[in-house]
Amino acid sequence: MHMVVGFLLASLIKQKSGIRTGLPSIRGKLEAVHALPGRMRLGSPLLEGLPANTRRKIGTEIKKIDGIDEVAINAHSGSMLILYDAAYIEPAIVHGVVVKVLGLEQDMEASPSGRLTREIGLLGRALNQQIHQSSGGLMDLRSSLMLSLLALALYRIVIQGDRTLPGGINLLWWTYVMAQRGK
């Protein structure tokens, strides 16, 4: 019970400390630090250490949009302050302009993947590589899984006499589906 209370408290504290601007974020590339009507500050490591002429070019491109009055880029902190006419232009439009000018459209559209998903993918690729090397190129992870399912299915059907679902029949089906995807 104490662990549940601890998790709840930790999540509540985390929610209170999180900055909620209502603007989309590209984690690690462009995040809204704060947004008020007519004023928004965006943070991006892409802006850190930029030369003055590059900062001016970015600011000039963003200010081409009607309603955006001022753009100030701080190369030391990697932040961008944008002043705009809140009655004329929406904050989401201003944010979209910055995404476009910084060339982050593909990052914005990309489906995010969690760290756990990436780690499991790395583990699967490493296991696939190891099976391939150990078998001298004869098998990979997919074929070893198919053979394992086939062996288990035959064991359950022939040795145990188990012909119920889910059981050996199900395992045979999974083997067939995996084999079809490999074509």
Image (cartoon, rainbow, N blue to C red):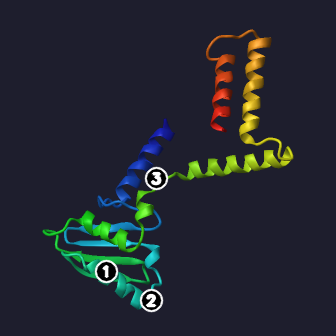
Residue for point 46% across, 52% down: 111
| Direction left: furthest residue | 87
Q: Earlier in the sequence, mark 3 or mark 1?
A: 1
Which disc is residue 51 wearing? 2
**Relative to 137, is 100 on the left or the right?**
left
Q: CA distance from mark 3 to mark 2?
A: 32 Å
Whether pointer 3 and pointer 1 mark residues with C-beta atoms closer than 8 Å, the reply is: no
Q: In the image, what residue occupies the spot 35% across and 66% down? A: 32
Amino acid type assigned to the residue bearing label 3 in the image: Ser
Q: Position of residue 52 (x, y in %)?
A: 40, 90
Q: Which of the numbered marks, if any, corresponds to residue 174? A: none
Quarter of the view holding residue 101: bottom left
Whether residue 158 sits left or right of residue 42 in the image: it is: right
- Identify the secondary structure beneath mark 3: loop
In the displayed structure image, the side of residue 86 where residue 172 appears, left or right:
right
Residue labelled with disc 1: 61
Eyeballing the image, is 74 above or below 22? below
Residue 105, compared with residue 122, is above or below; it is below
Q: Nearer the viewer, mark 1 or mark 2?
A: 1
